[in-house]
Amino acid sequence: MKTCSKPKKNTPKKKKTPTKITITRVDADIATHNGLFDEGCYGSSCKDECCGWGCDMDLTTLKLVQKHRKLVEPLIGAKIEECFSTPLKIDDDYIGGAYRETAVRKKDGLCAFHLKGQKGCSLFYLWITEKLPKKIVPTICRTYPITWHRGRLFIDKPLKKNCKAKEKTPKGTKVPSLFETQKKEVRALFDIPAKELKKLIGK
Ligand code: SF4
Ligand code: SF4
């Protein structure tokens, strides 16, 4: 006998907050372009040139930055509230479903979250030294110069002048590709369909 069930209320489904970024196609040159080999950014002559643009900070990152503000603020010499150039924008293309753009410091022309007076990012620094969750580092800063936009994963060309991925290597020397040097981050942060992933892993 069929049981009678109560009619369900027509309530709108709650949208899931994105914890990974959905990718639908990848550019194959990610698997062939030289990567951030050896010690990566730290082992290059680059003075953190890509930090000169500031970055888009995912909502998930922003919440962690606010939670750990007492650790962040002394490293950057500013209050968190002073470190953004835009208000929060809702956007599913970001982890947490929204983002803010960071400001660029007048004094050194670098992102407001760059360590004051020395090479490196305060958020990477805190992840390493204080063992904070890695999501305290914005997605784009973990994968750069691999980036994404509305489902496409690609290399943000042209690369900055002194980017490690542009460094000349002796003829015949093989260095790991961008996918090889960034794959841990790419896999942790993006949902890539198997067909597209094959372009990168070649199987
Ligand atoms: S958050 Fe850190 S790595 Fe990202 S742009 Fe700012 S200083 Fe550079
Ligand atoms: S420009 Fe290249 S080498 Fe320099 S900090 Fe950015 S990713 Fe690293």
Image (spheres, rainbow, N blue to C red):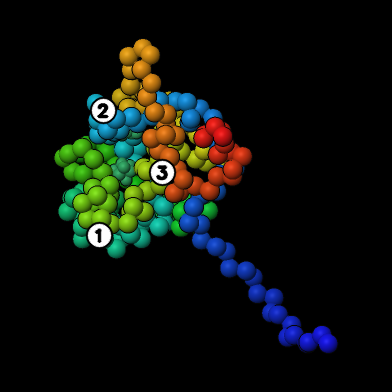
At horizontal 46% and vertical 38% (from top left) the residue drawn is 147
Amino acid on which disc 2 is placed: Ser
Asked if disc 3 is less than 8 Å from ligand 2, the answer is: no
Q: Is residue 77 above or below residue 143?
A: below
Residue at image x 75%, y 85%? Answer: 5
Name of the residue lying farthest toward the top: 171
- Report the residue marked by disc 3: 184
Discs 1/3, front? 3
Q: Which mark is residue 69?
A: 1
Query: Rounded to the nearest whole Å, what is the CA distance between mark 1 and mark 2?
Result: 30 Å
| Residue 142 falls left or right of residue 16 | left
Q: If the image is split into quadrants, where does the C terminus sit?
A: top right
Of helix, strand and loop, which one carries label 2?
loop
Residue at label 2?
44
Front one among 110 and 7: 7
Q: Is mark 2 within 8 Å of ligand 2?
A: yes
Mark 1 belongs to which amino acid?
A: Arg
Q: Position of residue 157 (x, y in %)?
A: 45, 27
Q: Position of residue 140 (x, y in %)?
A: 40, 43
Do callouts 1 and 2 mark residues in contact (Cβ within 8 Å)?
no
In depth, the one of 8 and 76 nearer the eye is 8
Label 2 or label 3, whichever lies nearer to me, is 3
